[in-house]
């Protein structure tokens, strides 16, 4: 991984504001090309900061938010509205305040809607496949993997163990393929039941940004960039993969010049 794929910002606030500006421009560029855009959201503290800066951005008006599809990279298999759900976080942080089309907001099924994470993954995979086949996307985007709509951007956090989405080191879900989403049981981080996009689905995106903040992520960032054995190191989007980090998260990257 070249240092050109790693962008270091001074601190978490500067990082979040910069990512928010990049995000708005990315969606605007996608809409300029094909009239709509699609983004995969993530969860976590730094993601919440990013969403907050999107909401207050002076340039947010360059995006037609009613023509953006919002997806999630993973979700905790918990009831609707639970504060620990990534959907809840994103709605509270910015989605509920933006003029989005509710039919273009695609949360992963909650535990009070379906019975198991496997069923939730099946439902989500079917929704992904349905949107991918819909006429409003036909012929408007570069080739993607079968059954997955064109993701212009996938946002990912990284755990201290190097996981992304709910793809944990050594967990069978990391090797999953075929359907776009998979149910997760026995996750090493609570809650143990989750739903996640598979690595091939993530890597089918036009762009993937891995966002990391804080010294607690420094070891995982370094290992993922240098050894490419952790799940985060396996992210290879079709167009580009960027690591957007703050100085604390980049503290161990002494071998790269920025």
Image (cartoon, grey):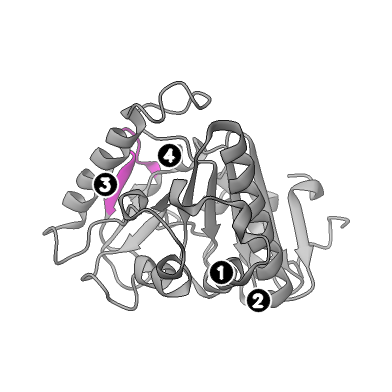
At 18% from the left and 65% from the top, the residue drawn is 111
At 49% from the left and 49% from the top, the residue drawn is 39
Residue highlighted by disc 2: 214
Q: Nearer the viewer, residue 109 or 196?
A: 109
Mark with earlier residue (4, 1): 1
Q: Quadrant of the N terminus?
A: top right
Q: Tag 4's secondary structure?
A: helix
Circle number at residue 124: 3
**Magenta part of the chain:** 175-183
Residue contact at pointers 3 and 1, CB within 8 angstroms: no
Q: Residues within 10 Å of mark 2 (few under 14, many from 20)?
A: some
Residue contact at pointers 1 and 2, CB within 8 angstroms: no
Q: Residues within 10 Å of mark 4 (few under 14, many from 20)?
A: many
Residue 236 picture location, percent across and down: 58, 40
Picture layout, residue 209 above or below residue 18: above
Mark with earlier residue (2, 4): 4
């Amino acid at each position: 991984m070249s240092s050109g794929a790693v962008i270091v910002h001074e601190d978490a606030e500067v990082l979040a504001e910069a990512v928010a500006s990049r995000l708005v421009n990315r969606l605007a560029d996608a809409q300029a090309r094909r009239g709509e855009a699609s983004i995969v959201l993530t969860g976590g503290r730094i993601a919440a900061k990013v969403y907050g800066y999107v909401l207050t951005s002076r340039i947010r008006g360059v995006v037609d938010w009613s023509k953006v599809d919002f997806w999630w990279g993973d979700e905790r298999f918990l009831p609707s509205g639970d504060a620990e759900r990534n959907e809840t976080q994103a709605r509270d942080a910015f989605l509920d305040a933006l003029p989005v089309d509710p039919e273009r907001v695609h949360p992963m099924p909650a535990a009070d809607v379906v019975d198991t994470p496997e069923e939730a993954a099946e439902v989500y995979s079917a929704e992904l496949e349905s949107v991918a086949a819909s006429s409003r996307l036909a012929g408007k985007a570069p080739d993607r993997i079968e059954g997955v709509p064109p993701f212009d951007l996938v946002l990912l956090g990284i755990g201290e163990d190097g996981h992304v989405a709910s793809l944990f080191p050594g967990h069978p879900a990391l090797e999953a393929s075929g359907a776009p989403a998979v149910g997760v049981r026995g996750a090493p981080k609570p809650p143990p039941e989750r739903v996640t996009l598979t690595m091939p689905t993530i890597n089918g995106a036009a762009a993937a940004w891995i966002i990391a903040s804080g010294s607690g992520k420094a070891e995982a960032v370094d290992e993922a960039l240098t050894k490419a054995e952790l799940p985060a190191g396996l992210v290879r989007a079709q167009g580009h993969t960027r690591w957007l980090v703050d100085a604390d998260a980049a503290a161990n990257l002494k071998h790269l010049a920025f």
